[in-house]
Amino acid sequence: MPSLTIHRPAFLAVFLSIIAISLQLAAPSSIYHELEANQSCRCTAFNSSCWPSAQSWQDFNRSIDGRLIALSPPASPCHDPNFNAQACRTAQQRWGFPFWRADQPGAMQASNWEALGRFTCLINSPRNSTCFQGSVATYAVNATESRHIQAAIALAQARNLRIVIKNTGHDYLGRSTAPGALMIWTHNLREIVYHEKFAPMGCTIRAEDPPAMTIGAGIQWEDLYAAAFNRNHVVVGGGSSSVGGAGGNPMGAGHGPLSPLHGLAADNVLELKLVTADGRLIVANRCQNRDLYWALRGGGGGTFGVVVSLTHRLYPPLTNIVYASYSFVASSRRAFRDLLVRFTELHPSLERAGWSGVFAMSNLTALSMTYLLPNRNWIIDPAERELAEFPLVPAVAPRDPVRRRAGLPRAQLLHHAIARHRWNPLLLASRLIPRATIQSSPNATADAFIAIQDRFPLVSITGIFVAGGSVSRPRNNAVNPAWRRALWHVILGISWMELGDLEEERIAARNVSAANQFLVDLTPGSGAYGNEGDFNEPRWQRTFFGASYPRLLAIKRRADPAGMFRCRHCVGSEIWSEDLNCPAGIAQEDQPLVSSF
């Protein structure tokens, strides 16, 4: 097992986050009262008095078949003393590729979550510059069997260690890593099993049992799409195919281009196998562990256990897809506003017709969109005409509109066309825009978009038209009820140069939150998708979980009373300190301090 060097500053300790600017909501006093008076802080690598010795780690490594990895930042091969010219060249060439990042246990998809304030490891800094461990966890268990996960949890229980759970690192609140922690890395749980008819374990077999696929926790959407296609089926998954298909995405809700047709990813989860906080391997479905089954479909990842496998419902193949791509440029601000108003007004009819897709706007003049309409075959179809005849308001010019039908192979692989992104560093905020707002307030909606672009020109606006249709149908799961009322999921994003200073990053965090406030004000009583939410969301319980939160909290307290699984803005996290290592209000020596801006 390789040795590990953790670079630490000489004064005090380092900051947990460059962007922690929110005020934490007060935790319910009843929860505090249930904490044991002598409950200690979690042990991390910064505390040598409790952290296991090198010999202990070697013994543990032998017990898990040599699956323990001493983690280092993904840029470490470009720095002394670990410089490796070939590995450095590969890292530099593939730095922004999500599949490469998913394969590096120490990498997050947004590289800002690898940093700890100023203490980071940059890919393009000089070879002799210091490569700090940053927020990269200290060790990882590279799990290939459920017993490896059980062993990691047993060790964490015995030694009071802080643990984190990671598959691909697609987490924009930094929940897949923590400084000084033990990581459970599920990326190499790679099994895929097809079921012609799936009866959940312990349930009576029914004639209507659907086809399904059970996947290991490490399978990404790209793998599952290909496997489903080879079986002549489709599955509801994300637009980014590098995201994990059995992790925080479906457990947090999970949206994709087929959601209006078949619902959210969480709506199509039939069964989960997971390791609980007490180390048991259990199954959750509609017939057993039903509270956990409810919670794991919408209540978020990294909270109730470590998922080993997950079973997705499959659907018949698409017969066809109508594909429409438009770009509009307005000659004036007024013309752009008129375009946005008309564009907003169009969406209730587009929902009824079955469209889904993505739109973006920029520079107070430009609107682009890529929309899909599944299972349409006619040459002239009313659903297609709604978009084909999208009126060109005065002083707005379309640029190279594209409308075409795709045959079956392209239809089945539609995800790949929109799946490959490069984004790091990155901060997000988002809001679910209700159907009622779009129907009744198209002018106010357009004005909110214009205000964001006017006040925050560096903040990107991306609209995900994946709600409505089947998503609107209530289900017996923990998905934020705001999804059932929404038509749009609007994401705001901001990025910056990796070599930028800390103040630039602080400003970026404040700006994306302030920009999102325009959408919050537009949609009182709505919420947001927690997987793409604001790190600094002050009312995260209500915003990310809505009316589901009280029941989720009760399930969390029963399933994990000691808080083995904890993460930012996750169910039950309000009782922990900002760094999540201690009960709130308790300081811990030899731990990174938290900076609140």
Image (cartoon, rainbow, N blue to C red):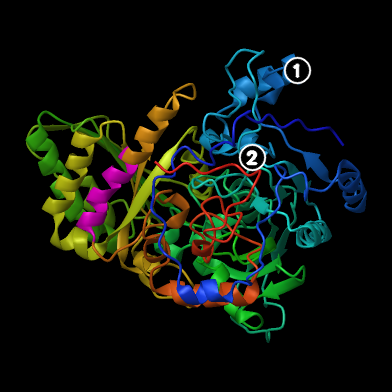
Q: Total label count?
A: 2
Q: Residues within 10 Å of mark 2 (few under 14, many from 20)?
A: many
Labelled pair 1, 2 in contact (Cβ < 8 Å): no
Asked whether 31 falls inside the magenta stretch, the response is: no
Amino acid on which the number 1 mark rests in the picture: Asn
Secondary structure at numbered mark 1? loop
CA separation in Å, label 1 and label 2: 21 Å
Amino acid on which the number 2 mark rests in the picture: Ala
Q: Which mark is residue 84?
A: 1
Q: Toward the viewer: 522 or 130?
A: 130
Q: Which residue is mark 2?
A: 102
Instruction: Tell me where residue 353 appears, x and y as whole percent.
Output: 29, 61
Of mark 1 and mark 2, the one earlier in the sequence is 1
Which quarter of the figure is the N terminus placed in?
top right
Instruction: Tell me where residue 39 appears, x and y as whole percent.
Output: 66, 66
Asked whether 520 falls inside the magenta stretch, the response is: yes
